[in-house]
Amino acid sequence: NRMTSAGGFRTPELIILLSAPKNFKTGVLITLALGFMRDGLKVYYADGENGEVAIRKRVEQSILQCTEEELKNPDIYGQLDESLKWYTVRGGNMMIDSYIAYQSTTADVYTRLKQLKADTGFVPDVIIWDSIDHFMPATAEDRKKDERFKIRKTYFEVIAINKLLGCFSIAPSQVNRAAVEKKVFSMKDFAEDFGKAANCHATFALCRTPEEVEAKIGRIVPVVQRQGVRFHPNMACVLEIQEEIGVVKEI
């Protein structure tokens, strides 16, 4: 919180979590989603990578702080129901849907959200796009254009959806190959298109050296923000990350 602008994230912001592959980005996103739920917010998780069942399982692991093997015990679900009360007591909720990577569009997500509103009254306060780079622009004409244009168009369409729904979005994105082993990522390290840094409202990097992965820690570093703390390699929120039980905690 101390690294963000006063008041935290707001409509229609698009916040990017920048990191290397297999660095537990989804685990951090799930932790954020559960935190928003506890605060009484409604979260929509648009998954384009892992599958709905896998995301639900990881959410349950994070809530119960248990291993995947422990989750197979049928007795644990009574504990899950009890724990969920603490996440939903203020009206928080989470809906999860999966989409086909590189075929599904931002329009598909918006159409689904309109359906959820009509059927159940669910309107998200937060949308998590995992990963935003797996979604395509809405129109067939835009999908035929070069990769940089498609990325830029997708970002603008996500921001437009935020405006229409009165929410904000958080999404992970990869660093480029040259940056994978760097200790701290900067705005120059976005994969595919440097323009991502300009088109989002803020970017935070999840940084983890091999030694930090071994020690089960990581660092959240502010890369770029339109409001809030500016980039500095020594400015970081240090995290405890226990991947096997889905736990991410600020140290």
Image: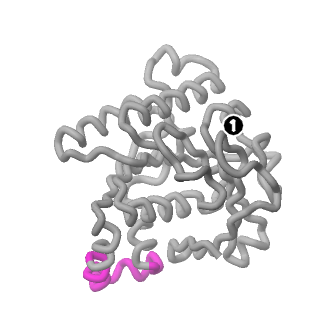
From the image, tell me which residue sits under label 1.
197
Q: Look at 24% across and 42% down and name the residue there.
A: 116
Q: Residue 71's image quarter?
A: bottom left
The boundaries of the magenta stretch are 65-81
Q: Is residue 181 visible?
A: no
Residue that lies at the very extreme toward the front in this rendered image: 6
Q: Nearer the viewer, residue 220 or 62?
A: 220
Q: Is residue 178 visible?
A: yes
**On the image, which quarter does residue 123 sit in?**
top left
226 lies above or below 53: above
Identify the amino acid type marked 1: Ala
Rendered location of residue 34, percent (x, y): 42, 64
In which quadrant is the N terminus drawn? bottom right
Q: Residue at x 31, y 83 (%)?
A: 76
The local secondary structure at tag 1 comes to helix
In this view, the residue farthest toward the bottom is 75
Q: Residue furthest left?
A: 119
Image quadrant containing the C terminus: bottom right
**Does the stretch in magenta take in 22?**
no
